[in-house]
Amino acid sequence: MKEKNCEELQREVERLKSLLDISLKFGSTLDLQELLNLIMEIAKKTLDAEASSIFQIDEEKRELFFVVATGEKGKEAKTIRIPWGKGIAGWVAEHGKPLLVPDVSKDPRFFQDVDKKTGFKTKSILAVPLIRKGKVIGVAEVINKKGGGEFTVEDTILFEAIAEQAAVAMENAKLYSQLENLFLSSIRAIVNAIEEKDEYTRGHTGRVTEYSLLIGKRLGLSNDEIKTLELSALLHDVGKIGIPDSILRKPGRLTDEEYAVIKSHPLRGVKILEPIENIKHILPGIKHHHERYDGKGYPDGLKGKKIPFYARIIAVADAFDAMTSDRPYRKGLPIEIARKEIEENRGTQFDPECADAFLRELDENPERIEEIIKRGRE
């Protein structure tokens, strides 16, 4: 009896530890996908299941789709959608109640298409709703208790607590995304207002941002890194606010003094943005986007990998847009000539890795680049 009590106590400790682990994960990443994957891996391990998953609800299409699918067939499962009300997950989403199914072959609600398409063999399921503010926003499942056992009522109670953490993460991510989109919209509005003063720079920031993101994705940047790159690119020329229009819009060649003023815009940009505490991480990309890989750029003459990574990406995007955009004194260069310039200057003006990523994009998706340039000329 004493031994049994010790085993039960040990199980309870393990369950509490799993909930604590999930709570700690909340502070380790802002990436929702990464966080949900971590939560469901913990759920799978704690509940001794072969697989686990989270479904989100597509209200427009009245379907459930996989957000997370762990286990050996998880990758295949993520391509499948389940009609509203179908399957165990559909029933849980519709009724907002947990469901424990010890043998799916005896439950008419079981949706067999997932097993047929993935080759996975589902035997038992424990499914619970993800609820926020009284509304079902998804469903979490653990599948097949290892060792041929069955999920228990205690498992259900623990899984509901885990599901609540997942629901909080999804709700927080939605709110954060809304705030982030509002912030980016405000930034774009400010940048557009600045660029409207000059027909030749109108849309420059948007195009540089698009090119930068294409390079970033080619280089395999994470979601968080892409967001940092996007904000850095959107604000890379904000320092031009403090430069007189007579210099910015001068149709002829600049004097040495005027060029020195133009070259001050990265530092002016940093000075403008420095007081904003939560965007300090983008300042290196803004300050150094005119550095050259060979060390002959400005403001600090940094060389090679000492140039901040986001600045190296923006440098390629900025130069390409400058070459392909119309100016008062010339028409924009054809894509093939601008491409040749980037290729010939990889390793001198440009980081070879960033230049190569953009060259691949130019070669494999020329229509996309042409569309961005075309929008800038309309």
Image: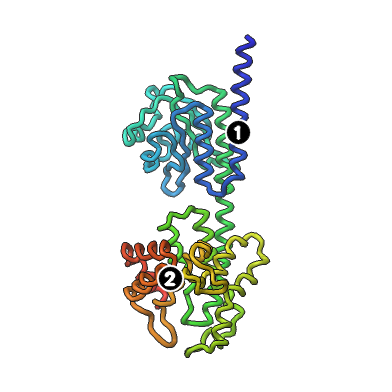
What residue type is disc 1 on? Leu
Can you name the residue that lies furthest to the top here?
Answer: 1
Q: Where is residue 289 in the image (x, y as percent from the top left)?
A: 52, 70
Q: Nearer the viewer, residue 109 or 178?
A: 178
Residue at 62% x, 40% y: name it: 24
Query: In what quadrant of the picture does the C terminus appear?
Result: bottom left
On screen, residue 213 versus residue 113, left or right, reads right
- Look at the image and tell me whether residue 378 can be seen: no
What residue type is disc 2 on? Thr
Q: Position of residue 361 (x, y in %)?
A: 36, 63
Can you name the residue that lies furthest to the right here?
Answer: 275
Q: Nearer the viewer, residue 225 or 371?
A: 225
Residue at 36% x, 65% y: name it: 359
Query: In what quadrant of the picture does the N terminus appear?
Result: top right
Can you identify the residue that label 1 sits on?
A: 19
Q: Position of residue 240 (x, y in %)?
A: 57, 77
- With respect to residue 171, does 272 lie above or below? below
Residue at 43% x, 37% y: name it: 85
What number of labels is visible? 2
Badge 1 vs badge 2, beta-carbon distance below 8 Å:
no
| Residue 272 occupies quadrant | bottom right
- Look at the image and tell me whether residue 197 can be seen: yes
Can you identify the residue that label 2 sits on?
A: 348
Q: Which of 22 and 81 is in front in this view?
A: 22
Callout 2 crowding tier (Cα within 10 Å): few <14, some 14–19, many ≥20: some
Q: Distance between the residues labelled 1 and 2?
A: 52 Å
